[in-house]
Amino acid sequence: MAEHPAYPVGLRLTGRRVVVLGGGQVAQRRLPALIAAGADVLLVSPEATPSVEAMADAGEITWLRRPYAEGDLSGAWYALVATSDAVANATASAEAEAHRVWCVRSDDAVQATAWTPATGTSEGVTVAVLTTSARGRDPRHTAAIRDAVVAGLSDGTLVAPHHRTRTPGVALVGGGPGDPDLITVRGRRLLAEADVVIADRLGPRDLLAELPPHVEVIDAAKIPYGRYMAQEAINNALIEHAKQGKSVVRLKGGDPFVFGRGMEEVQALAEAGIPCTVVPGISSSISVPAAAGIPVTHRGVAHEFTVVSGHVAPGDARSLVDWPAMARLRGTLVVLMGVDKIGKIAETLIAHGKAPETPVALVQEGTTAAQRRVDATLATVAETVRAEAVKPPAVIVIGAVVDATPTSEQP
């Protein structure tokens, strides 16, 4: 007789009895979803994993600490049979059949009357993937399909055009350090839903090529010491497009609130009555050193790291950085936007007690294909920057962590 494919259906289990036989790894994986579905879960097992035991202790499930006995499926709507006793599994499966209880068997899919699909959720949608046959089932294959679909829904690359989400307002999205794969899932999804994108030069530019043709892209690039779009103009553009009922994404490099003027934009939008969502991004202050093999903290070397802006030189009346205090710190100092000021910064740190031989690394275009790392010391960094023609954007790391290697051992 030809084997028929399984019929997919969603079970509404709120308040309905579900019996789980066996408290091992299978139960540990399946119980959270059953609990989330509101099922009245009865676990029958002489022992359980610590995680399953914790669910029982928290009152999320009822646990009978004994082996399966005939009659345990009485009143059940659904059963999961996952013990290590093949005879008990077969007996429980027969009881389920006799009482017309849908039954999943972890040890024998052919004899089961129900299968558990590979499931995932994204934005209120549950994705469930089943194979068409019990024989030759490969859970890894269904899980891979599920992951691909959920990822597509999460990052916005898989959206039916007529169901495209449009939420008027502004999202300040941190794009990360430059590699387009390092934007958050939420940030990528919001980009896919946008009508207008106002992008910085340091945002992940490759993502702009993925946008549909109808999306308006506004260049808000702030080229150092060149043309720039004034902050007030950026604020006005955000407000103008949002008031037209459009979904606007302000795409920034790194994190919106780490030297990104994100709060200025939030305040301007609030004053205009425009709803705003802030999506954090991976800050270049941590990610770029990591991409170059430098940990900003390391056991036995640095228990702290400090991030400062170097766009204003020490001694400038506009500077808010206490550079003498920076010189006294024993941990790592990360300087952003400081390439052209690094000579004065190094001179000031040395003048206030930092050792001239303190290691320094400059990581230019971090996480991108153009990334390069240039090493120096406080005493040599100014000349090294000139000799190596280091240009912004570059993250500067000052401290002993620069010399850390993958094989270094610290007490």
Image: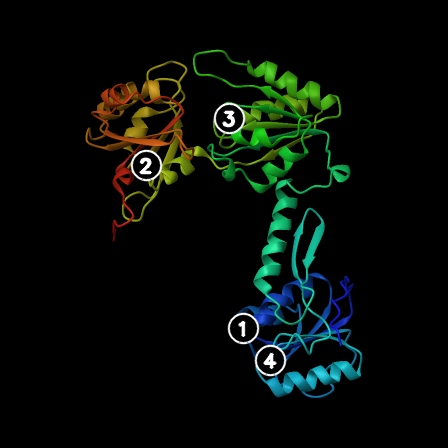
- Sort mark 1 into few (<14), some (14-19) or many (20+) by Cα contacts within 10 Å: few
How are the residues colored?
A: rainbow
Q: Nearer the viewer, mark 4 or mark 3?
A: 4
Residue 272 visible within the image:
no
Q: Nearer the viewer, mark 3 or mark 2?
A: 3
Q: Amino acid at mark 3?
A: Gly
Q: Residue under circle 1?
A: 49
Instruction: Name which quarter of the figure residue 33 lies in.
Output: bottom right
Q: Earlier in the sequence, mark 1 or mark 4?
A: 1
Task: Determine the CA span between mark 1 and mark 4.
Answer: 13 Å
Q: Residue under circle 2?
A: 332
Task: Determine the CA span between mark 4 and mark 3.
Answer: 55 Å
**Picture layout, residue 48 above or below residue 400:** below
Task: Determine the CA span between mark 3 and mark 2.
Answer: 22 Å
Residue positioned 61% across, 40% down in the render: 186
Q: Residue under circle 4?
A: 83
- Sort mark 4 into few (<14), some (14-19) or many (20+) by Cα contacts within 10 Å: many
Instruction: Name which quarter of the figure residue 235 lies in.
Output: top right
Residue positioned 38% across, 39% down in the render: 291
Q: Nearer the viewer, mark 2 or mark 4?
A: 4
- Sort mark 2 into few (<14), some (14-19) or many (20+) by Cα contacts within 10 Å: many
Q: Amino acid at mark 2?
A: Thr
Q: Earlier in the sequence, mark 1 or mark 2?
A: 1
* Image position, residue 190 (x, y; %): 64, 35
Query: In the image shown, does 164 or 336 lie closer to the viewer?
Result: 164
Disc assigned to residue 260 = 3
Please say if the residues under marks 1 and 4 sit with CB atoms less than 8 Å apart. no
